[in-house]
Amino acid sequence: MLYLFFFAAGLLAYGYYAYRGLVEKLMKPAPNYPDKTRVLAHKKIVVCAGDSITHGNISHDWVSDLAKQNPDYQFFNAGKNADLSFTLLRRLDDVIAVQPHYINLLIGGNDVNFIMGNKNNYYDLNKVTRNDQPSLQTYTQNLTAIVQRLKSETSATISLMSFPILSEDLSHPVNQMADTYNEAVKKIAQQEGVIYLPLREKQKEFLKASGVVSKTRFEDTDWLIRKSGLAHHIFGTDWDTITRQNGNLLTFDNLHFNSVGAGMIQEMVESVLKNESL
């Protein structure tokens, strides 16, 4: 019995440190994070800035897909896992340094998830301090400041992407809150004269047309993130398969997208690059 106890304890310890190691690996910036020493003078520079949906290692990597399909551009990935509007605002120097021709902003999901989900996750990752108090007011202030600084310190065309869905249960309070936040995104885009990309609207329309009732609860998000991350990074299961296994269509864990959900982002950004109407 003592042997079994130590064996089980060893497995638990191994699992814990393996998981922590995976988290540390995933929190590192993307290989193509903005770096002015790597700018190619003969290409137009595109920076995609945001959180994990843009970072693309715990969500389908739509930035890499864009880069493969648009070789005339140089793409920098300024997405960072678990970022809020606070943290993106604090690292704008990295984006400005490469003097992009085009910037896409997709930020805010974690501002809402901080309020509706597990706040300790963000404290543990040093994404917010105890002095930061995420709210609709602070989000509006931060996003406005982000857009205004990028407008004043670059000559880039800027697109502001609407709020992503937060779970596929559109009636859940988290999505009702996200609807309210998205009104702020619309207003800022209009006031600042930047392009508004209707991601949220397209995703909601897709889900409503499908008639599929989500089998996942928003309250299970933390568990789904861990389970899905291990399935993908340890066992090699692709995001689309995990999504199906979890009974969803666009997200596998309520926050992060498979190839279908991420493909909607890619199409909208690409349409701006090609000056197509939305």
Image: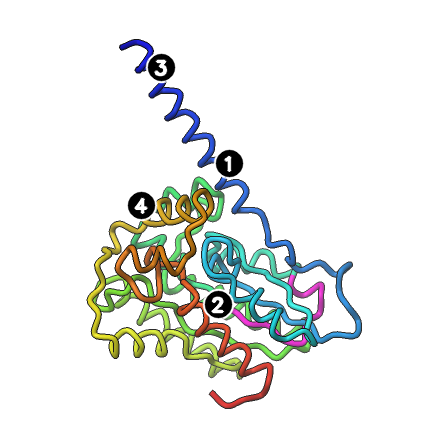
Read off the residue under disc 1.
21
Mark 3 vs mark 2, foreground winner is 3
Q: Nearer the viewer, residue 202 or 9?
A: 9
State left or right for residue 7 relative to residue 73: left
Q: Quadrant of residue 146?
A: bottom right
Q: Which is more toward the observer, 68 or 57?
A: 68
3D distance between C-alphas at marks 2 and 1 = 27 Å
How packed mark 3 is, by other alpha carbons closer than 10 Å (few <14, some 14-19, many 20 or more), is few
What amino acid does circle 3 point to?
Answer: Phe
Inspect the image, locate mark 1, and give the three-letter code of the amino acid beneath it: Gly
- Between the C-alphas of marks 4 and 3, the distance is 26 Å
Q: Which mark is residue 223?
A: 4
Q: Quadrant of residue 31?
A: bottom right
Please indicate whether residue 23 sits to the left or right of residue 248 in the image: right
Q: Secondary structure at mark 1?
A: helix
Of label 4 and label 2, which has the lower sequence position? 2
Closer mark to the observer between disc 4 and disc 2: 4
Q: Position of 98 compared to 192: left or right?
A: right
Q: Are marks 2 and 1 in contact (CB under 8 Å)?
A: no
Q: How far apart are the two marked residues, 4 and 2, measured between alpha carbons?
A: 24 Å
Q: Identify whether 81 is placed above or below 66.
A: above
Which amino acid is tagged 4? Trp
Q: Quadrant of the N terminus?
A: top left
Label 3: which residue?
Answer: 6
From the image, tell me which residue sits under label 2. 106
The alpha-carbon separation of the residues under discs 1 and 3 comes to: 22 Å
Of labels 2 and 1, the one closer to you: 1
The residue stretch that appears in magenta: 95-105
